[in-house]
Image (cartoon, rainbow, N blue to C red):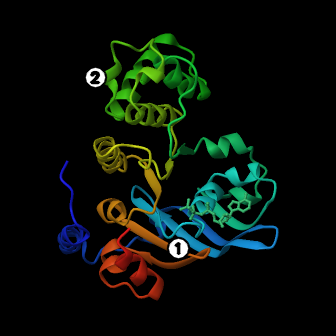
Amino acid sequence: MTTYTIKEEMMNLDQKTLINSGNTFPESDSILQIKNLNVWAADHHILKNINLKIPKNKITVLLGPSGCGKTTLLKSMNKLTDINKELKVMGHIFIEKDDILNTNKNVPSIRQKMGLLGQRPYPLPMSIYKNVAYGIKLKGIRDKKLIDYYIEKHLKEVGLWEEVKDRLNCSPTSLSIGQQQRLCLARGLAVKPRIILADEPTSALDPISSKTIEELFRKLKKHYTIVLVTHVLRQAIRLADNVVFMSDGKIIEHGHPEKVFNIPQSKQLKEYMVDGN
Ligand SMILES: Nc1ncnc2c1ncn2[C@@H]1O[C@H](COP(=O)(O)OP(=O)(O)OP(=O)(O)O)[C@@H](O)[C@H]1O
C-alpha cells in the first residue's frame, strides 16, 4: 500500500480545493441538525453547547484529541447516550424534522435510521448469512427469495459477496477482522439507514483493510450520509467533505476541509496539525 506524508495528503487536498472551490452546503441539504447540545456526567461538562448541521450524502469527519467528546457526540446522534444513565443530555437533535431528544417516537425506530459501525466488528454468533438476514428481518421482510436477494445486494454493496458467496453458512469467525467489519456494515445497511455513524472503524484494521473501508465509504456516500470519528489526521484529509474539529467538548472549527485544513484559525487545530497524528 502506498503511504503518503501529511504534506502529500495536503497536496491532494489542494487538488480537491481546485475542484471544489466555491462549494457550500445549502441549509436544505442537511439531514441532521444539532442545536444547543450539552452533555454532562455529574459535574463534568462533556459537550458544551454544540451546534452543527450534518450535510446529506457527504462524509462528515469528527476530529480532535483524545477525550474531546467525539464519541459522545456520535452516540448522542442515535440516543446511545440513553444507555449511560449517568449522562445528562440537553438540547435538540433534529432528523427529518423529529427532535429525537424530545420525541415520543420509540427509540428503535430512530436508531434504525442510523447504522452504527464501531472500532471492532461485533458479528452476531450465527452464520454469515444469518448475520445479514437479521438486519433484513428487522425491516419485517420474511420472504426467503427476497431475503436471499437482499443478502447478495448488501454483501455486494460492501464488496464482500465474491469473498463469502461459497461459505454463507460458515461462522463469521472464519473471516478476517477487516471482512468481519464489512459484514457488520452489510448487516447495518440491511436495516436501510439514512446515516452511517462510524466510530474509528479502521482503528483495529491492517492498512489494506483500512483502505478498503475508506474506498467503501467514498462509494457509499452516494446513497448514505456518513459521520466518521477519527483521530487520524491523514484519514480525515483523505475522506472528509466536511470537517468538525473539536477540543475540550467544543467545536473549535468546522466546514470544508480545504478551508479548515489549509487555513486553520485556532491555536488548538494548528497544534493538532503540527503534532501530525
Ligand atoms: N459515561 C461516561 N461517564 C463519565 N465520563 C464520561 C462518560 N462518557 C464519556 N466520558 C468522558 O467524557 C470525555 C469525552 O469522552 P469521549 O469518549 O466522547 O471522547 P473522544 O474524543 O471520543 O476520545 P477518544 O478519541 O479517546 O476516543 C472523556 O473525558 C470521558 O472520560
Question: What percent of the width, then of the height, locates residue 256?
Answer: 36, 73
Question: What percent of the width, then of the height, locates residue 210?
Answer: 34, 46
2 vs 1, front mark: 1
All told, the count of numbered labels is 2
Vertical arrangement, residue 254 with respect to residue 263, above or below = above
Q: Secondary structure at mark 1?
A: strand
Three-letter amino acid code of the residue under disc 2: Glu
Number of other residues with Cα within 10 Å of mark 1, as a class: few under 14, some 14 to 19, many 20 or more: many
Q: Secondary structure at mark 2?
A: helix
Vertical arrangement, residue 226 with respect to residue 258, above or below = above
Looking at marks 2 and 1 on the same chain, the residue that comes earlier in the sequence is marked by 2
Per the image, the residue denoted by label 2 is 162
Vertical arrangement, residue 7 with respect to residue 149, above or below = below
Image-based side of 108 in relation to 245, left or right = right
Q: What's the CA distance linking mark 2 and mark 1?
A: 39 Å
Image-based side of 164 in relation to 73, left or right = left
Number of other residues with Cα within 10 Å of mark 2, as a class: few under 14, some 14 to 19, many 20 or more: few
Q: Is mark 1 within 8 Å of ligand 1?
A: yes
Quick one: which residue is furthest to the front in this view? 275
Picture quadrant where residue 134 is located: top right
Three-letter amino acid code of the residue under disc 1: Met
Residue drawn 36% across and 45% down? Answer: 220
Where ligand 1 lies, by image quadrant? bottom right
Is residue 3 visible in the rendered image? The answer is yes
Per the image, the residue denoted by label 1 is 246
